[in-house]
Image (tube, rainbow, N blue to C red):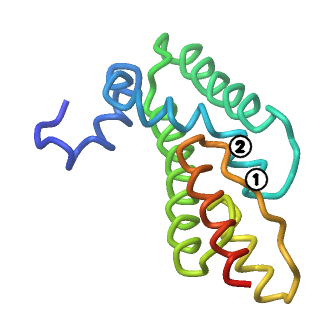
């Protein structure tokens, strides 16, 4: 393991993904808990639980191949794969939140990218309330506020 704290967490995780799993557990758990909502709402599709199931199958396959070749499931390839998966999730989430704030997107923040595409192409996008309970209160307030201003 490298020393240097957060600066080297990605390289440490790539080298030893299973060993550092407890440290990144909350980030991974959060992504796992809302991944289906995230993909289904973000892409305006109803793929049920398939996004998460396919992600887990892919990650398990990478770990299995790593184990078959090195007798260790926690290979650098698994570490890179998990970091790329988390990178996609948090990058998409961050961009969506920034766009939602800039565009005053109604409803779920995950709709912000499609809201921007809709504004560019002059198509109306669907509105969704956020499935995360604390944010759904904010969505309901935004909806009441927008009705009052009309």
Residue 9: x %, y % from top left: 27, 41
Residue 134: x %, y % from top left: 53, 44
Which quadrant of the rendered structure holds the C terminus?
Answer: bottom right
Q: Residue at x 46, y 14 (%)?
A: 72
Would you identify the image quadrant in which residue 66 lies? top right
Return the residue found at the far front. Answer: 148
Task: Indicate which disc residue 41 carries.
Answer: 1
The answer to whether the residue labelled 2 contacts the one labelled 1, judged by CB atoms less than 8 Å apart, is yes
Q: Residue at x 76, y 79 (%)?
A: 117
Return the residue found at the far left. Answer: 3
Q: Is residue 147 above or below residue 31?
A: below
Q: Residue at x 31, y 28 (%)?
A: 23
Q: Is residue 116 above or below residue 93?
A: below
Q: Nearer the viewer, residue 18 or 49?
A: 49
C-alpha gap between disc 2 and disc 1: 6 Å
Which residue is denoted by mark 2 in the rendering? 37
Q: Nearer the viewer, residue 128 or 27?
A: 128
């Amino acid at each position: 393991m490298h020393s240097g704290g957060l600066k080297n967490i990605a390289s440490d995780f790539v080298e030893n993904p299973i060993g550092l799993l407890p440290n990144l557990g909350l980030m991974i758990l959060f992504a796992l808990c809302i991944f289906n909502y995230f993909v289904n709402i973000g892409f305006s599709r109803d793929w049920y639980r398939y996004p998460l199931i396919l992600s887990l199958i892919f990650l398990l396959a990478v770990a299995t191949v790593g184990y078959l070749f090195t007798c260790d499931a926690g290979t650098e390839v698994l570490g890179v794969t998990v970091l790329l998966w988390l990178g996609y999730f948090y990058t998409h989430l961050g961009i969506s939140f920034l766009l939602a704030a800039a565009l005053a997107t109604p409803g779920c923040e995950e709709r912000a990218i499609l809201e921007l595409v809709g504004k560019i192409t002059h198509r109306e996008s669907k509105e969704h309330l956020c499935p995360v309970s604390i944010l759904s209160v904010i969505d309901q307030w935004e909806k009441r506020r927008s009705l009052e201003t009309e």
